[in-house]
Amino acid sequence: MNVMLMFINKIRLRKILIILFVMFFFTGLNAYSAEVTLAVLDFDNNSIFNAENYEPLKAGIAEIMISELSTVNVITIVERKKLHTILDELKMSQSGLTSNNSIKAGKLVGADYLVFGSFIVTMNDKIRIDTRVVEVETGLTVKAEEVTGKTKKILIMIQKLGEKILHGIDEKLLENEKTTFIKGQKLDIDAVIWFSKGIAYRDMNKYKEAKDCFSQALKIEPEYKQAKNELKLLYNME
């Protein structure tokens, strides 16, 4: 009788251990399957030479960065319009979002991380782009990166920054995620500026002006993929 009871207890213990193992296994998987939410702020223009000409890139670089990061399944990006609405309600400029204000704005848009950035275009046709990723919960900078290169490689440079940002947030979260982007295009910087102007008009719901800008970008670079996509979306809205 005692032998039978011991046998039954062993079976019960084995079942309990199996159940606990399954529970911990799937809990571990779920811990790294949750999405991470990013908010990308417009980049600051620190250019000195011909700075006004490059001003549209503030919105354009942010939009290109968003487009690249959006290809990663576990990343959710806060819409720029939603972010701008929050900033308007708070009556603060993006340049003020570097300390306590950044935490407040990030929480209001439901972001886990805020991506700040700046760029400077030099006289020798080079551009440097800096990014800083801030964790909303703690206010700490978890990643800071920069790239420098010829302006015609701006898309490739933004892609590199995007990859560095992703791997700086959580390696385990992204270990099963494909984070190598398709190689970017080399583009005339004027085409990117026109594209950036189009993004700014699109954000203001000035769709005619936006279409004109995207069309100008395509006149300079007929194979500019993102400009083509934005123009197509606007025509589909009609």
Image (spheres, rainbow, N blue to C red):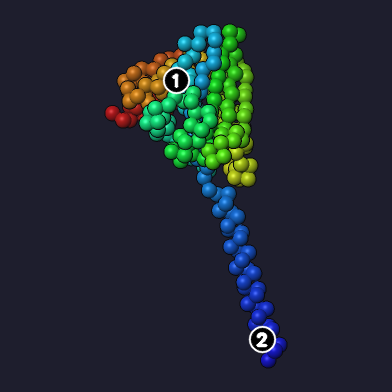
Pinpoint residue 10: horizontal percent, then vertical percent. 67, 78
Say which quadrant the N terminus sits in. Answer: bottom right
Image quadrant assignment for residue 80: top left
Work out whether mark 2 precedes mark 1 in sequence or the reverse, and give the earlier one.
2
User: Of all residues shown, which one is farthest toward the front?
Assistant: 100
Up-down: is 55 above or below 14?
above
**Other-residue count near label 1 (Cα within 10 Å), few / some / many at <14 / 14–19 / ≥20:** many
Image quadrant assignment for residue 86: top left
Pinpoint residue 34: horizontal percent, then vertical percent. 53, 48
Q: Amino acid at mark 1?
A: Ser
Q: Which mark is residue 5?
A: 2
| Residue found at x 62% / y 24% | 146
| Secondary element at tag 2 | helix
Pinpoint residue 104: horizontal percent, then vertical percent. 47, 36
Say which quadrant the C terminus sits in. Answer: top left
Pinpoint residue 171: horizontal percent, then vertical percent. 63, 42
**Other-residue count near label 2 (Cα within 10 Å), few / some / many at <14 / 14–19 / ≥20:** few
> Mark 2 near mark 1, Cβ–Cβ under 8 Å?
no
Viewer-nearest residue: 231 or 143: 143
Viewer-nearest residue: 46 or 192: 46
Q: Which mark is residue 196?
A: 1
Residue 68 seen from this side: no
Up-down: is 126 above or below 174?
above
| Secondary element at tag 1 | helix
Viewer-nearest residue: 214 or 161: 161
Up-down: is 148 above or below 89?
above
| Residue found at x 58% / y 27% | 131
